[in-house]
Image (tube, helix red, strand yellow):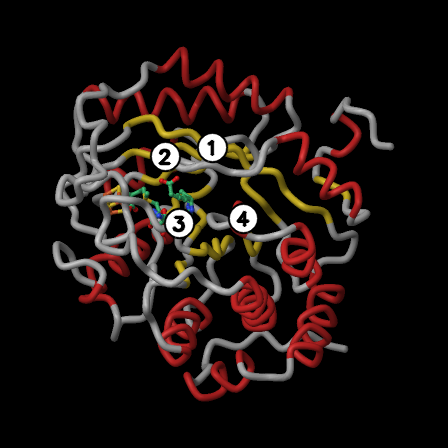
C-alpha cells in the first residue's frame, strides 16, 4: 500500500470516517499505522507545569484561568531553572524521552521568565531529550529564539472546531491560535497541536477540528487527543463524561488523516479503563503522558502505565532503559 498523504480533506469525509463501524475504522487506522510507522514504539512524554494558574484567558475547561473559581494557585511563582532541570533528569531516568513544560500564560513576554524558559529548553536538550513548551501566543522573534535554544516542538492546541470555539473561549480568536502556529512553523520548530473531546461539541465539530489539523501543510508532527477532565470550579464541571470509544474513534481518525504524526493519547486516561487505552494504542496512538500528574490534574501512575504497555506488548522509545521487572 502506498500512503496517501492529503491536505484537502472535507468535513463530510472526516465525519464519515468518525462514523464508520468501529471494527472497520480500527482496521483502516491500523493499516495506515503499520505502513507509516514500522517498528511501532510508544513515546513516553513527561509533563511539568512550570508556571501554574493565574492565566488571563477564559478557557472553559481550564483549572488555571483567573475567570474560573478553580484557579487557586495564582500565588505560585514560576519554577526556577534548576528544579525544572532536576525534574527533567528524573523523568529521563524513569524512561521518558520527551519533556514538556507548561506556562499558564496568555502570551510569552520578553524578560527574565522568557530567558529562564530558554535556559530550560537548552538544559533539557543537553540531556538528550526532546523539549516541548506550551506557553500561549508568541511573536516571530520569540519563536526564533526558542528555535535557536533547540526547542523540538511548541504545543498550541486548537482545542475544538472553529464553529464551537466561542462557546469555550472568548478572550482570543481561532485565527490568533492559527497565527501562533504559523510563527512556530516559520521558525522551524515542530508543531504540536490537537484538541479536546467532551466539551459539548457535535460529531461534526470533531470532524471540523480534525480538518483544520489535517489540512495543514505539512501536518503537525504531533497531535494530542485529550478527553475533557471536568475540573470543579470550571464552567464545564457538569459536562457529561466523554465515552472512551469516542476517544478511540478520534485517535483512529487522526491516524488515518495524518499518517506520520505522533498521535498522543493525552488527558482523560484516568477515566478510561485499561482495555480502552489499549484500543487507543491499537488505533494508532504512539505516545502517552507519563507521570503521576498532567499539569494540575491526575494521570495514571508510572508503574500502572509500564504494566499496561507491557501487557499490551508495546515497546517504548527507550525500552531497554526502563529498569522495573517486566513479568
Ligand atoms: N496556556 C497555554 C495554552 O493554552 O496554549 C498552555 C497550557 S494549556 C493548559 C495546554 C492545553 O491543555 C490546552 O490547550 C488544552 O487543550 C489542554 N487542557 C487544559 N485543561 C484541560 C482539561 N481540563 N481537560 C483536557 N485538556 C485540557
Ligand atoms: C495537551 O494537549 N494536553 C496536555 C499538554 N498538551 C500540555 C495538558 C493536559 C492538561 C490536563 C488538565 C490539567 O492537568 O490541568
Ligand atoms: Fe488554561 Fe492555557 Fe487557557 Fe490559560 S490559555 S486558561 S493556561 S488553557
- Per the image, label 4 sits on a secondary structure element best described as helix
Q: Are marks 3 and 4 in contact (CB under 8 Å)?
A: no
Q: Does mark 3 have its CB less than 8 Å from ligand 1?
A: yes
Q: Are marks 2 and 1 in contact (CB under 8 Å)?
A: yes
- Per the image, label 1 sits on a secondary structure element best described as loop
Between the residue at mark 3 and the residue at mark 1, the CA separation in whole angstroms equals 12 Å
- Residue designated by label 1: 293
- Per the image, label 3 sits on a secondary structure element best described as loop
- Residue designated by label 3: 229
Closest to the observer, 293 or 79: 293
Check the picture and name the quadrant holding the C terminus: top right
* N-term mark: 2 or 3: 3
Q: Can you name the residue that lies furthest to the right here?
A: 327
Q: Is 125 on the left or on the right of 148, as rendered?
A: right
Q: Vertically, is 289 above or below 293?
A: below
Q: Vertically, is 320 above or below 166?
A: above
* N-term mark: 3 or 1: 3
Q: How crowded is the residue under tag 1: few (<14 C-alpha within 10 Å), some, or many (20+)?
A: some
- Residue designated by label 4: 269
Between the residue at mark 2 and the residue at mark 3, the CA separation in whole angstroms equals 10 Å
Residue pictured at 43% horizontal, 35% vertical:
151
Residue pictured at 55% horizontal, 31% vertical:
291
Q: Does mark 1 have its CB less than 8 Å from ligand 2?
A: yes
* N-term mark: 4 or 1: 4
Amino acid at each position: 500500500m502506498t500512503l496517501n498523504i492529503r491536505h484537502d480533506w472535507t468535513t463530510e469525509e472526516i465525519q464519515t470516517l468518525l462514523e464508520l463501524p468501529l471494527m472497520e475504522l480500527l482496521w483502516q487506522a491500523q493499516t495506515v499505522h503499520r505502513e507509516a510507522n514500522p517498528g511501532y514504539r510508544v513515546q513516553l512524554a513527561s509533563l511539568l507545569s512550570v508556571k501554574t494558574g493565574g492565566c488571563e484567558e477564559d478557557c472553559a475547561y481550564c483549572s488555571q484561568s483567573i475567570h474560573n473559581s478553580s484557579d487557586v494557585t495564582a500565588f505560585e511563582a514560576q519554577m526556577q531553572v534548576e528544579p525544572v532541570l532536576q525534574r527533567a533528569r528524573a523523568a529521563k531516568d524513569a524512561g521518558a524521552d520527551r519533556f514538556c513544560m507548561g506556562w499558564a500564560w496568555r502570551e510569552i513576554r520578553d524578560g527574565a521568565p522568557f530567558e529562564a524558559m530558554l535556559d530550560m529548553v537548552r538544559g533539557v536538550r543537553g540531556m538528550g531529550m526532546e523539549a516541548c513548551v506550551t506557553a500561549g501566543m508568541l511573536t516571530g522573534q520569540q519563536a526564533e529564539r526558542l528555535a535557536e535554544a533547540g526547542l523540538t516542538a511548541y504545543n498550541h492546541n486548537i482545542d475544538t472546531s472553529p464553529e464551537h470555539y466561542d462557546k469555550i473561549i472568548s478572550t482570543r480568536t481561532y485565527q490568533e491560535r492559527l497565527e501562533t502556529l504559523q510563527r512556530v512553523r516559520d521558525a522551524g520548530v515542530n508543531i504540536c497541536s490537537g484538541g479536546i473531546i467532551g466539551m459539548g461539541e457535535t460529531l461534526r465539530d470533531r470532524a471540523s477540528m480534525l480538518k483544520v489539523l489535517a489540512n495543514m501543510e505539512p501536518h503537525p508532527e504531533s497531535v494530542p487527543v485529550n478527553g475533557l477532565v471536568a475540573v470543579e470550579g470550571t464552567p464545564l464541571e457538569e459536562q457529561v463524561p466523554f465515552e472512551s470509544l469516542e476517544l478511540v474513534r478520534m485517535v483512529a481518525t487522526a491516524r488515518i488523516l495524518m499518517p506520520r504524526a505522533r498521535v498522543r493519547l493525552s488527558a482523560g486516561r484516568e477515566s478510561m479503563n485499561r482495555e480502552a487505552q489499549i484500543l487507543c494504542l491499537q488505533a494508532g496512538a504512539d505516545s502517552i503522558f507519563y507521570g503521576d500528574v498532567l499539569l494540575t490534574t491526575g494521570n495514571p501512575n508510572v508503574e500502572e502505565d509500564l504494566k499496561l504497555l507491557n501487557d499490551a506488548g508495546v515497546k517504548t522509545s527507550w525500552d531497554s532503559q526502563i529498569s522495573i521487572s517486566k513479568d
